[in-house]
Amino acid sequence: MKKLLITGVMLMTANLLKAELNIPKYKNLDYKPEKLQPLKIDANGLKLYIKSDKTLPIIKITAFIKTGKVYEPNDKVGLGTLLFELLREGGTQKYKSEDIDKKLEYLGAEINTTINNEDGSISMYCHKKDFDEVFDIFVDILTNPAFEIKKFNLKKMEIIEMIKRRNDEPSKQATREALRMFFGKDHPYGRRPEIENIEKITVDDLKEFHKKFFTSKNIILSVSGDFDEKEMFTKISKELAKIPATTTNIDEIKEPEIATGKKIYVIDKPLRQAFIVILHKGIKRHDEREFPLSVLMEYMGGGIQSRLGNEIRSKRGLAYSVYQYFSKRDKSGFIMTYLGTKPESVEEAIENVLNELQKAKNGVIDEKEFEMAKSQLINSFVFRFENVSSLLNEKASYDIFSYPDDYLYKYTEKINSVTINDVKKIAENFYDLNNYLIFIVGDYKKFSSNINKFGDIEIVKED
Amino acid sequence: MKVFLIILSMSIGVFAMDNSKIEELKKLNAYVETSPKYPPVIYYKLKNGMKLLIYEKKFAPVVSFTMMFKVGNVDNIQGQTGLAHLFEHMAFKGTDKIGTKNWSKEKEILEKIDSIYEEINKEDKKPNKDEEKIKKLKEEATKLENEAEKYQVREEFWKIYNELGQNQMNAFTSTDYTGYVVSLPSDRIESYFIIESERFKNPVLRDFYKERSVVLEELRMNKSDPSRVSWENLFSHSFVAHPYHNPTIGWEDDVMHLTRKDAIEFYKKFYLPNNATLAIVGDVDPIKVIKLAEKYFGDWQSGIVPDQNYTKEPPQNAEKIIKVYFPSKPMLKIAFKNDGINADDMPALIVASEILANGNTSRLYKKLVEEKKMALYIGSHHSTPGNRYPSLFIIASAPKGNTTVEELDNEIMKEIENFPSNPPTDWEIQKVINNYEISILKDLESNLEFAQTLAYNEQILGDWKFSWEMIEKIKKVKSDDVVKAVQKYLQRNRRTAVYLLEEKNK
């Protein structure tokens, strides 16, 4: 096993540590994940990362798939979710769903599926002695799903039940509805499944969606565990050569139109806490500004020691949970500030958040805290690569989005080169205090009536 | 004997410790586990009673720590529920060196703030409290807090760790324990010892009353969440005398009156080296770790841990059904009193729990989710909320479609009552064993998770090998034992059910 690289190259010397305690001074870690060479299956060009890891008698495979909920047809939102649930639970041509459950659960093995907005994955985990049996099921799930009608109806019923329950957890409700208003109720980045969408979905729809996305060009595999690399590659090549190499047209997502002005939406609900989401426009994927933006997010909202953690939680005791982060999509992105506070302090909390954003926008960035945010990002980067499977998974999950090959390798360098002026510029551009959306779920009658100074209020009925 | 072989093969890969190193460790009075039955963990006890568990694992240059204390909300006296949890928050506020610019000046002000809050408490608890007086006192306290701030470095504890590159820094309070976790790049291990020894030897509970407000927000967040509301009701109605009755976060009225003095007394009683285990997993040299532990924790004074026996829960002898109304869709939680994790028939009850509700092949899933389509999900656990005292076998579910909570509950009970006439098959029992074996391997994958398991097993269950020994016990369980356990424990006069119902139906 090749050792990961740690060199002593100095990036910057940390000097905030207290002298009194004699905490040693450390240079920022210059950690770079090992460079990985993908292999390709001859027959169809399917790309895979394979690395043996003998520490435990376990084998793990993850198939990363370029797909996503954003590609669901507008009248069948929920199709991707149903497909991925049924890949695992709906049986295959070779195995009945019941037999898959029995086999996997008896062995303590797992096959899991996930679909996100713009990607999906199917993973397997087993003891090495069970590999052949579990891998055979994994391959059939990937290539020959059966969508048994009994399971199809059951999963539909479950998704419908989940839709009925979607407002049970107010924090989830607030974030989902905020994004829905921000990107638009019909835009793929904002929409949510409705019962009538789910009812309309047919088995043929699932087959079509599966056929469209499960091609060799859309799948990247990561394979790690206790095996011989050559043997494993041969085995996988043989089984996955049947994945078609067809090119399919994936519909282009329209750039969302984000409303301008200051708007507050409120869902009035008699809860002990008010859940507040503030959204600003962010960046698209593959925008170099992500590096200074990452530093700004860490500085402003990356934990208790951040600006918002300090001002909202620590200093004023207004919230238990308060943070800010950004998320990027192909055609847009957002910056989300989240906090929960008692309904009586909604005004005070929002006021203090906006004040902090305003300060940063005006160029007031604390230099020590800025350096600390950079150190945190640089020094904790190594934790994304704690074991072989996470090393491979990190790489594959960026490849799916066509990041440059050296993206992870250069990550800490890029963060390290961010200057305080870069961050000031980002704050000036992105903390737009004339254009934002606030979404609150809470006991409206207890809010101060002054909150209309933050924008026009619209009461929304939950559904 | 599969598990033995698995661990043996693993120990060759992960941990090739040479004999000279083992000899050197033995000279330090460390105990090196060499039995192939267990992972090669190193055990070391300081003179003050603090225990150290070290597991060396090399791939990435990182290390994870868990410091576990045997103190949780169960140890809080009536009137001070939630104190263990609030103290856990306070343990991030620094020391007489971290978080302050001038400790002696800051200290004076903190004491003044304390006496104001004592006065506020006194007034607030009066039947005819003087709101105006309380308001004035609070303003006075705020002034002093602002003055104290001049001498403080806000959240310096977090700042130091963040600059070091901490990952997953957190702490957990449960009914039974309080655990502090963090991961660091492995070249920074000495910093951990410097900071943590300060933290547990000389904590300063600055910003106490602000943090109390933060915890009250946490409490309000919990009270807005239907699942948490139903759990809290389940525990408080299941237990009437034993302190598992109290929510871990505390009763709101207690939390809002907790003082810094309460917290300091609590710290002095329970935060003792002989009440703690530190587990370290990752890219470390065990000899160096032991030397650092001696250097930084060696002078931590041991003491007498208070008696931790509390009022025993009397036999329930009643079936309780509690209806809770909440603005959300309905949920169901069921609890049966068990006899504790060390009861002879606990392994059989564990098997029962797994057979009933673990996975798509489990009995309750097949019957209620698939066949009858009454439940959205179903799960169970053999011992919640804790393991230090007799606890609860629990089942959690939610109805689907037009099913009511009551119908779902009846159906679950019907399945349980039918259990003895369908004793577990060999296949069902072997499935449980296989799953436990794999889960132990999974645990070893993550440094932090393994550190938590080791520290929890040692400090709360009495032996870091607890998980491995439990598997051995489970392997001996016979079908008939499982039936007996179900008959003994899952019966109505040990049962409490919480029906969380939609508010509009009240």
Image: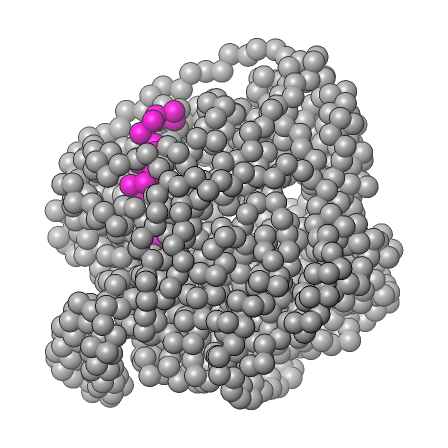
**Residue B409 visible here:** no
Display coloring = one colour
Q: Classify residue B313 as left or right of residue B262.
A: right
- Front residue of B458/B297: it is B297
Image coordinates for residue A71, horizontal then vertical, percent: 48, 23
Q: Determine the residue positioned at 53% across, 67% down.
A: B292
Q: Classify residue A121 as left or right of residue B467.
A: left
Q: Classify residue A239 as left or right of residue B69.
A: right
Image coordinates for residue B146, horizontal then vertical, percent: 16, 69
Image coordinates for residue B156, horizontal then vertical, percent: 31, 61
- Front residue of B493/B91: it is B91
Span of residues in magenta? A284-305
Q: Determine the residue positioned at 63% across, 31% down.
A: A222
**Residue A419 visible here:** yes
Q: In the rendered image of this protein, does residue A48 appear above or below residue A415? A: above
Image coordinates for residue A16, horizontal then vertical, percent: 30, 55
Q: Determine the residue positioned at 40% across, 58% down.
A: A24
